[in-house]
Amino acid sequence: RYKNAAGEHIPGVSTIIGQLAKPQLILWANRLGLQGIDSTKFRDEKAEIGSLAHTMILSDLKGEKLDTSAYSQQQIDQAENCFLSYLEWHSKHTLETQLVEQPLVSEAYQYGGTPDWYGILDGIPTLVDYKTGGIWKEAQIQVAAYESLLALREVGCPQRIIILGIPREPTETFREVTLTDWKAPWEAFKALRQLYDCLKGIKE
């Protein structure tokens, strides 16, 4: 949880963006249901694999050893497939790390967030966000909020943002989305931040 300079709890980026409706998830769950698959169990299993793969990537960037004892061998195997896709991408680029998974807080907009990676990628100041599975519109809003945290805290000033969609299974494809203009996603985030306070003031 994030706190401002006054020691008060403030919302995180994911909480703020979580207000958005996700109609694509309803369609996805319906398709699974028609196949006789419990969408909740399926989602939770994929989330565990995605979380482990994400942690593997960030641990590699930090140069840390990861303890995987809490996961099943099947989860580890699938997460390692993601990790290998990331390593293949990494091998084609030069990365100079300046920040990995560092919590930041905006006093100006009263929110917190933890960007995945910021540094010099192939000679260009770049913010990179690692996603396992699909890349949805919300991802652009998320990274725009992270970019603002970096700029406001004078941690860095990205010239571009890259969102990597790393597959968890053979049916998914590796995607790389590059943003050089994130004005619209940032405006969307500010509107969601304001909405968060408005909704908080409405009693059930």
Image: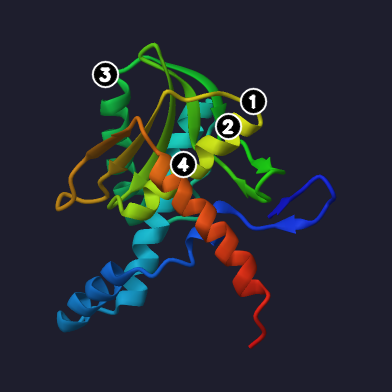
Where residue 204 sits: x, y (%)?
63, 88
The disc label shown at residue 154, or none: 1
Q: Nearer the viewer, residue 96 or 141?
A: 141
Is disc 3 in contact with disc 4, using a CB cutoff of under 8 Å? Answer: no
Q: What amino acid type is highlighted by mark number 3?
A: Lys
Mark 3 closeness class: few <14, some 14–19, many ≥20 residues within 10 Å: few
Q: Which residue is mark 4?
A: 144
The disc label shown at residue 163, or none: none
Q: Quadrant of residue 90?
A: top left
Residue 4 vs 191, above or below: the answer is above
Where residue 47 sits: x, y (%)?
39, 60
Choose mark 3 or mark 4, whichever is in front. 4
Q: CA distance from mark 2 to mark 4?
A: 10 Å
Q: Which residue is mark 2?
A: 150
Q: Nearer the viewer, residue 46 or 180?
A: 180
The disc label shown at residue 92, or none: 3
Q: What amino acid type is highlighted by mark number 4?
A: Ala
Rendered residue at 61%/36% (across/down): 102
Q: Earlier in the sequence, mark 2 or mark 3?
A: 3
Residue 13 vs 46, above or below: the answer is above
